[in-house]
Image (cartoon, rainbow, N blue to C red):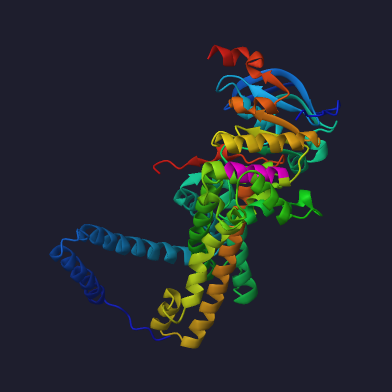
Amino acid sequence: MAAKTTGMPLLATDNISIAAAGRVLVSGLTFSVEGGETLRLSGPSGCGKTTLLRALAQLVDVRVGDLRLGGSSPAELGYPTWRARVSLLQQQPAFHDEPVADALARPFQFATRAGRRYLPDEAVLLLRRLGLAESVLEQHARSLSVGQQQRVALVRGLLVQPAVLLLDEPTSALDDASTTAVVELLQERAAGGLAIIVVTHDLRLNALCDRTLDLSLFACAQAQAR
Amino acid sequence: MNAIPLTPLDLALAAALVLVAGAVSVALRLTLERSLALASVRTVAQLLLVGFVLEWVFDLDRAPLVLALMGVMVVLAGRTAVNRSGRRYPGLYLQSIATLIITGLLTTFVVTGAIVGVDPWYRPQYVIPLLGMILGNSLTGISLTLDHILESLAEGRDVIECDLALGATRWEAAREPVAAAVRRGMIPIINAMMVVGVVSLPGMMTGQILAGANPIEAVKYQIVVMFMLAAATSLGCIGVAMLAFRSLFNARHQLRAERIVRSRGR
């Protein structure tokens, strides 16, 4: 299914630099994604792909440069609101010690989603799409396999309906059938206007990605020298 | 008051009880006798020392000297509370001391000024022992609270950042660990309040009764003391938990777990 992009920059970076543990990893990075577009971030391990996702989600600061979502900076939107609209799913899904149903409902208790309700039927529908039975709702999230946790995390990431979904190796623990289901579901959401930025080494996600940004082209001299 | 004075022979007899425990340790090869002997010697030395110090302190008749002594007690308690915690972050000593200055001194002076009506307000016979009790209980609560919240934020970083990444405010993400840490710090004083008079008779009350005080008067003092300790401990635990929260989450609602380091020797 070909994604239909909106032609309007949704998330844009302007000449940003990112650092981890005091070491600048990437500098002078300018790019944007449109609604409905899927961008793959590539590059060798340690080049800053995960850090860039964390910076786009504003879990860490951008050293220099500017971030905009629909023309607004994180400070203008408010940082929690920014993250409600630019949501990151980390490579290792993390859950509180609670049943899956509570884990899925948790983000709807946040003030940034005031007035929006958790819809259990929609959750069940999405879980089934990804090969998970309804009974998984009663299981404790931490007791699930990593592959099941990745799919539950993805369901939660879709239920909250961000404008941009940041995915860090979302299929690293999934078999072919589950990966295909994930790709089809994400393509549908992209067709509905969701922008996706994905870090992955998984060739099975090729069909999902519209274009690739090679971060090694922006690796700063200091990082390259190491 | 008609307390029966204790002679050195009475103290020696009490020491004989510890010798019995030491003998049992030797017989059963529990290897506790050295620790028991050291603890006994320290008990005698420390209490005699504090007895002489208190004699000197109670003769102090100047507010600045009493306040200075209280300041030293607060600083030592604040440092001890942090040292007992398995983790720390920059600025924690200052925060712990500041918390104890506010909660410890406030509670002490509310009790001595408004409830007991001590005159003059700095009378050391009252303010020093009461502050000592408050600090002893508060530092236990504070160290437990710090230990719990710093472990939660360091070990549970992924879960907290997951909440933040889905749009939680810093308070929404931190509320559960903060509340659990305060509960953890309050457990000792809550337990003490639950069993006081039923399972245990508090040392202060027992001491007053042994010294010849009317039991009802001793009980009234003990009630004041328990409420005072509960108030000071809860305020102390809440205080350090909130300061830790403010120190480890910035205005951009980011968790700064990298600021947390393990204490040396842990």
Q: What is the quadrant of residue B161 in the picture?
A: top right
Q: Is B62 or A208 nearer to us in this picture? A: A208
- The quadrant in which the C terminus of chain B is found is top left
* Residue A27 x %, y %: 68, 18
Residues shaded magenta: A149-158
Question: Which sits in the foreground, A179 or B118?
Answer: A179
Q: Which residue lies furthest to the left in this view?
A: B27
B205 is higher (above) or lower (below) than A99: below
Q: Can residue B167 be seen in this view?
A: no
Q: Nearer the viewer, residue A179 or A146?
A: A179
Specify whether B128 is left or right of A76: left
Above or below residue A187? Residue B57 is: below
Q: Quadrant of the N terminus of chain B?
A: bottom left
| x and y, in percent, of residue A63 in the image | 69, 25
* A175 part of magenta stretch: no
Measuring 53% from the left and 44% from the top, which residue is drawn there? B154
Above or below — where is B162 with respect to B148?
A: above
Image coordinates for residue B193, horizontal then vertical, percent? 51, 74
Residue at point 25%, 62% (across, down): B36
Q: Is residue B34 left or right of residue A217?
A: left
Residue A157 belongs to the span the image colors magenta: yes
Whether residue B21 is visible here, answered yes or no, is: yes
Instruction: Name the image quarter holding residue A78.
Output: top right
The secondary structure that dominates the magenta segment is: helix
Q: Position of residue B134 (x, y in %)?
A: 52, 65
Tell me the quarter of the picture where residue A6 sits.
top right
